[in-house]
Amino acid sequence: MTTGELTLPVTKAPKAGRRRVMGAGKQLHAGPVTYVVLTVFALVSLAPLVWTAIAASRTDRRLAQTPPPLWFGGNLFRNLQTAWDQAGLGTAMFNSVIVAGTITVSTVLFSTLAGFAFAKLRFRFSSLLLLLTIGTMMIPPQLAVVPLYLWMSDLGWSNQLQTVILPSLVTAFGTFFMRQYLVQALPTELIEAARVDGASSLRIVWHVVFPAARPAMAVLGLLTFVFAWNDFLWPIIALNQQNPTVQVALNSLGTGYVPDQAVIMAGALLGTLPLLVAFVLFGKQIVGGIMQGAIKG
């Protein structure tokens, strides 16, 4: 009798526990509707890239016909070679890697330092300076083209890569983005503990701030690289066809009495491939860093 009373709760408790665990596990599995929605979004997102590849593999005459082609042709490598030679994409790719890479590294570094200062350091007029920094985001970039061009001309940097790099070494968006992240992700107690242990400001930044900010730095780096690679307005003004970036070089493919649309699409495909390669190589690390930061938070 006593044994039955003791064993009855023991046998029921594991069953209830297993049901709760299984129920919680089922909630984590995606249903068929989720997969359908994600597939539709993926197809819609990939459609422009697929169409660019299809158009790049056809001839200009075939693209002008109705209905347009819906599958790949046999002229892809020929059009890619033509676009590469006509636009001088070898030099343009090299220049874009230097420009986008330098801007990305400097923006991530300076924005992280400035964001840390606004988030955790106390100094006079910090709120006013932050307000002014955010206010610059509301100024259209087109208003700065003329004074910026005159400034670069006075420095003697016309048609040189530093003309494109210097104005983008740090951004207000990057500073605000890192500030908002570090306010929540970096505990003030951790900084105070490092100061009590005798750590200098440089050591705190290197061993405390950068590890805590790594997920946001990865996201900001990816966004900055994409923006710098695709930037067209300022490079087309500051550079010429002898020393272009990718976007400036691709602009030359659209000139002429009858532009070859297939060659233009081939050039656009070549200009997009480095971004795809960068995402394939570093996308896993970026997503992993974001998930790591979310778990820590």
Image: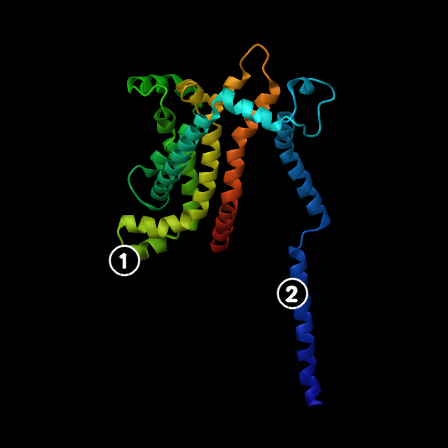
Whether tag 2 and tag 1 are in contact, CB under 8 A, the answer is no
Judged from the image, the secondary structure of the residue bearing numbered disc 2 is helix
Check disc 2: other Cα within 10 Å, few if <14, some if 14-19, many if 20+: few
- Residue underneath mark 1: 196
70 with respect to 248 (left or right): right
Q: Where does the image place residue 72, in percent across and percent down from the top left?
A: 68, 30
Q: Where does the image place residue 52, in percent across and percent down from the top left?
A: 62, 28
Q: Is residue 279 above or below residue 14?
A: above
Q: Earlier in the sequence, mark 2 or mark 1?
A: 2
Q: Residue furthest top?
A: 257
197 and 244: which one is in front?
244
Q: Is residue 154 above or below residue 292?
A: above
The residue positioned 29% from the left and 17% from the top of the image is: 154
The residue positioned 38% from the left and 25% from the top of the image is: 164
Number of numbered discs present? 2
28 and 252: which one is in front?
252
Judged from the image, the secondary structure of the residue bearing numbered disc 1 is helix
